[in-house]
Image: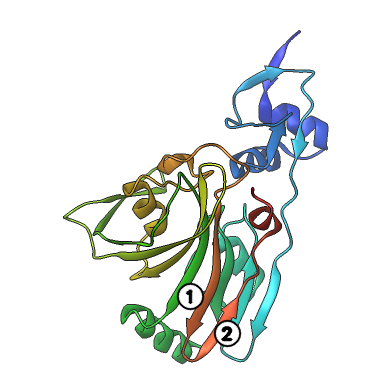
Amino acid sequence: MANEKAYKLLALQEGISNSQAKSLIDRGLVYVGNKKVMIARGELDSRTIFRVEKIEKIKPIYEDDNLIVVDKPAFINSDEIERQFKGAQLLHRLDRETSGVLMLVKDEDFRQKAIKEFKKDNVYKEYIAWVEGVMSEPIEVDKPIVTTRKNNKAHSNVSAKGKPARTEFFPDIVSAKKTKVKCIIHQGRTHQIRTHLRYIEHPIIGDEAYGGRRAKRVMLHAYKVKLLGMEFVAPEPKIFVNFQ
């Protein structure tokens, strides 16, 4: 039988454009059986049947005159969410496969005030991650991080030449050679939690770029943020609660 590029086959199956099909594959939402399709231009048997995972809806958490806070689903870029809220700007970003608390600001004075709080490390940021291996004791990693960008993709490493970064890790549940961990970040460098967990040889499950095994998604969730006397919580996704 003839082979054809994956994105073209998906476009035919779903009745969507080639670019929409390519975007679904690039996001990590397309499977054949239980195997994620990794390369949109990879060739597959023309009889291949795909399964497409749905992106969950954006859930509102809080809104006032200054701020919009949402629970960001996995597989969507922070910039895409910003485009959905006219007149609001991202205050910070979450990686595409990271879910949880995402804040956008509507007022410039408030934005400047909030940025100062981030710079002074006065913002409490708590994440939940499922990591490889057994973490039996709390660990603090105080190691500088350097970030390089190539083809519009960022990658970070622990390096003496980097910027200061400190992360606290508290094990919560250990289950079959993996651990659910509470992560509290200070400073907030690009890919800080992912980089520090790889450094201590507990990469996040699903985080193949930083040494984790393949999974449906990167198992990292922004659970709680405290800013200027306000507290916002995004409940754990079902996949985290049932990930035994």
User: Label 1, on which residue?
Assistant: 91
Instruction: Looking at the picture, tell me which residue is in the foreground, 128 or 225.
Output: 128
Do residues under tags 1 and 2 come within 8 Å of each other at their CB atoms? yes
Q: Quick check: 36 left or right of 205?
A: right
Q: Residues within 10 Å of mark 1 (few under 14, many from 20)?
A: some
Q: What is the number of callouts on the image? A: 2
Colour pattern of the rendering: rainbow
* Residue designated by label 2: 67
Q: Residue furthest left?
A: 160
Within-10-Å neighbours for mark 2: few <14, some 14–19, many 20+: some
Measuring from the top left, give residue 64's x and y in whole percent: 63, 90
Which residue is nearer to you in this view: 46 or 122? Answer: 122
Residue 33: which disc? none
Res. 106 visible in picture: no
Q: Is residue 16 above or below residue 149?
A: above
**Which residue: 42% across, 39% down?**
211
Position of the N terminus by quadrant: top right
Residue under the point 57% across and 48% down:
175
Image height check: is 229 above or below 1? below
At x 51%, y 77%, the residue is 225
Side (left or right) of 203 relative to 240: left
SS of the residue under disc 2: strand
- x, y percentage for residue 202? 41, 47
Looking at the image, is 119 positioned above or below residue 169?
Answer: below
Amino acid under label 1? Leu
Q: Secondary structure at mark 1?
A: loop
Mark 1 → mark 2, Cα distance in angstroms = 9 Å
Location of residue 209 (image quadrant): top left
